[in-house]
Image (cartoon, rainbow, N blue to C red):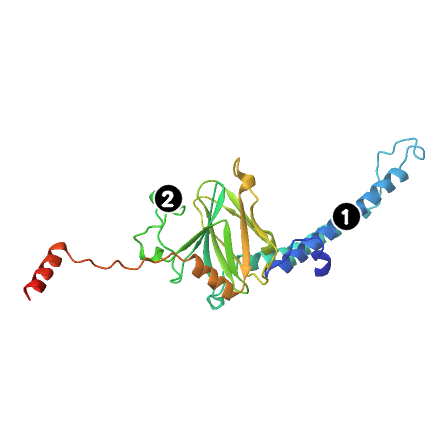
Amino acid sequence: MREFLARWMPTNASEHGPALDQMNAYLHWLMAILFVGWGIYFVYVLWRFRAKKHPKADYHGTNKHYSTWVEIAVAAAEAVILLFFAIPAWANWVKVPDPSENPMQIRVVAEQFAWNVHYPGVDGVFGRGDINLVNASNPLGLDPEDPFAADDIVSINQLHLPVDRTVSILLSSKDVIHSFFLPPMRVKQDAIPGQEIPVDFKPVMTNGDEQWEIACSQLCGLGHYRMRGFLTVETQAEFDAWLVEKAPKQEPPAEVQPEVEDVEEAAGEELAA
């Protein structure tokens, strides 16, 4: 089944992806059977009740109940898919990651027309944001006076993740409703202003030379077509190296220069000596 799906579906690189793909396959097989079955039945009815064989209309209808049994079977198949595939997959999707999994939290803030990605830095704590500080160079309004914000990393349209580690995306929006879509991760979630929605998943494959995109699947304005980001899944060592590369450069403390009067006094004492 997985080999068959791999021909038609995007690359599956998440831990929960196979269950979703399997459910998707079952639904499409059911729809295919219904399409062919009802098509054959329709042709049969056209032939069976053609006007040449029944010149006089019969208003009593059929006395058989084949269609009723078929409808019951279809409802039963849909109930099986719902109860044994859809609901368990949904329950697994909304389950909060266990702390033992060491989930990595990342904030993703959507705006017209970009994805702002916020990493908490080595201290693991997100810096405080202030809406009054938001500008072109500070899209998240990080407070430079907050010590927790000093090591935070902010990138635009670039989401880097380590492989084989649970990720918790805290998704929000600055303006209108967007939709955060990662096809290889089988992730799609609306970003809604005023809400911070957690999205949890675990990448199990690096993308190597393949380019994975972050798409906005909700029409969000005239520039919707260019709201495009990129997802990179790499080894933990590569991810750590990327964090070091993107970390804010800490300026060394300036050397304290002596006052002019102190310099002149020291020079006078030296001459006197």
Q: How many marks?
A: 2
Which mark, residue 239? none
Q: Mark 2 points at which residue?
A: 134
Q: Nearer the viewer, residue 258 or 55?
A: 258
Residue placed at 19% from the left, 57% from the top?
Answer: 257
Image quadrant assignment for residue 164: bottom right
Q: Nearer the viewer, residue 171 or 94?
A: 171
Q: Residues within 10 Å of mark 1 (few under 14, many from 20)?
A: some
Q: Give coordinates of residue 236: x percent, y percent.
A: 51, 65
Q: What element carries label 1?
A: helix
Q: What element carries label 2?
A: loop
Q: Mark 1 points at which residue?
A: 34
Q: Residues within 10 Å of mark 2 (few under 14, many from 20)?
A: some
The vertical placement of 139 against 236, above or below, is: above
Do the residues under discs 1 and 2 have CB atoms within 8 angstroms?
no
Q: Can residue 88 be seen at all in this image of the molecule?
A: no
- Disc 2 residue type (three-letter): Val
